Image (cartoon, rainbow, N blue to C red):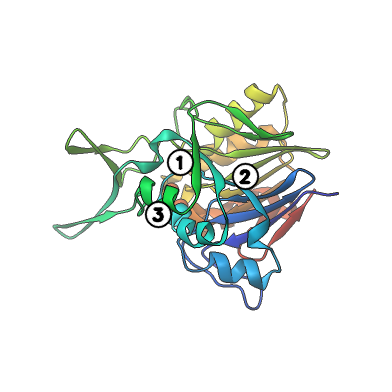
Amino acid sequence: MKTRITIVCENTASIQGGLGEHGFSAYLETERGKFLFDTGRGISLIPNLLTFGKDPLAIQKIILSHGHHDHTGGLPAILELLTGVEVWGHPDIFSLRYKITRKGNKEFNRFVGMKFHRAYLESLGARFLLEKGFRTITQDMYLTGEIPRLTSFEKGDPGLFAESEGRLIPDPIADDNSMVIDSPKGLVLLLGCAHAGLINILEYVLKQTRRDEVYAVIGGTHLDFSSLPQLDETIAALKKFNVKRIGVSHCTGLKPAGRLQAAFGEDFFYCNVGHVLEF
Ligand SMILES: [Fe+2]
Ligand SMILES: [Fe+2]
């Protein structure tokens, strides 16, 4: 059986009947079972699963890329359908986090963390498996855990903050995890927002898997919130991984996506609601 990844939450929808919302989620069908990576913002997950004929009741594990609201907002809806399920992620997914924006001399502070208390989610059947390190989810599927931030040009999003000891600090988003599938075609990297930096993530995945190429990269890259020099350096660095399929989503933004399309030509695709990747 081929592994199939269907995008079930994303900012835009390319398939009739699909709902778009700012967020990300992917449904994975594999020989080892069915898995949900992220849950979107909360509105589109269940309708899109049903529209695309994906059985929510078949989900065996939920994997969270990080604790932002647009990746965890659908948790209650899916938990209410299941009778208990493992939820994999990093211990920091419950951090209190904010996005600060300025308009003129006014500052706006918006909560962007997990909107649900851990006890509430556990009462709906979530069994949290929260760890910081690289680990095996099931055979040929891995979760990166914390990513070392090594590149000089991947600076993170300057608008994101977290509460620490009663004050706001730049959010390290240490919980940023990505999934890796070791397929017959090569490694497939599934990103939530890539807050740790796309190149940092790729370098770490190659190190952990002792490989030197990645077949496909799909998901959010957060390049929409990065500087132009970072985008240029990311595109230049990406070339060396010999990626055959690059399908960006969500926080990539349309302008950076256009630059990636120009750089990668036919290998590029926009990975929005309804898109299917088989390998
Ligand atoms: Fe996001
Ligand atoms: Fe995020």
Q: Is 15 on the left or on the right of 123, as rendered?
A: right
In the image, residue 41 sits, relative to residue 181, either above or below, namely below
Which of disc 1 and disc 3 is earlier in sequence? 3
Residue 193 visible, this angle: no
Q: Secondary structure at mark 1?
A: loop
**Mark 1 beta carbon near ligand 2 (under 8 Å):** yes
Q: Secondary structure at mark 3?
A: helix
Disc number lying in front (3 or 1): 3
Task: Identify the amino acid type marked 2.
Answer: Leu
Task: Identify the amino acid type marked 1.
Answer: His
Which of disc 1 and disc 2 is earlier in sequence? 2
Disc number lying in front (2 or 1): 2
Picture coordinates of residue 219, whole percent (x, y): 58, 50
Q: Is 135 on the left or on the right of 140, as rendered?
A: left
How far is the residue under mark 2 from the one under mark 1? 13 Å
Q: What residue does disc 3 label? A: 69
Q: What residue does disc 2 label? A: 190
Task: Identify the amino acid type marked 3.
Answer: His
Q: What residue does disc 1 label? A: 195
How far is the residue under mark 2 from the one under mark 3? 18 Å
Picture coordinates of residue 160, whole percent (x, y): 32, 45
In the image, residue 94 sits, relative to residue 248, either above or below, namely above
User: Which residue is painted at 28% across and 37% down in the image?
Assistant: 170
Numbered label attached to residue 205? none
How far is the residue under mark 3 from the one under mark 1? 14 Å
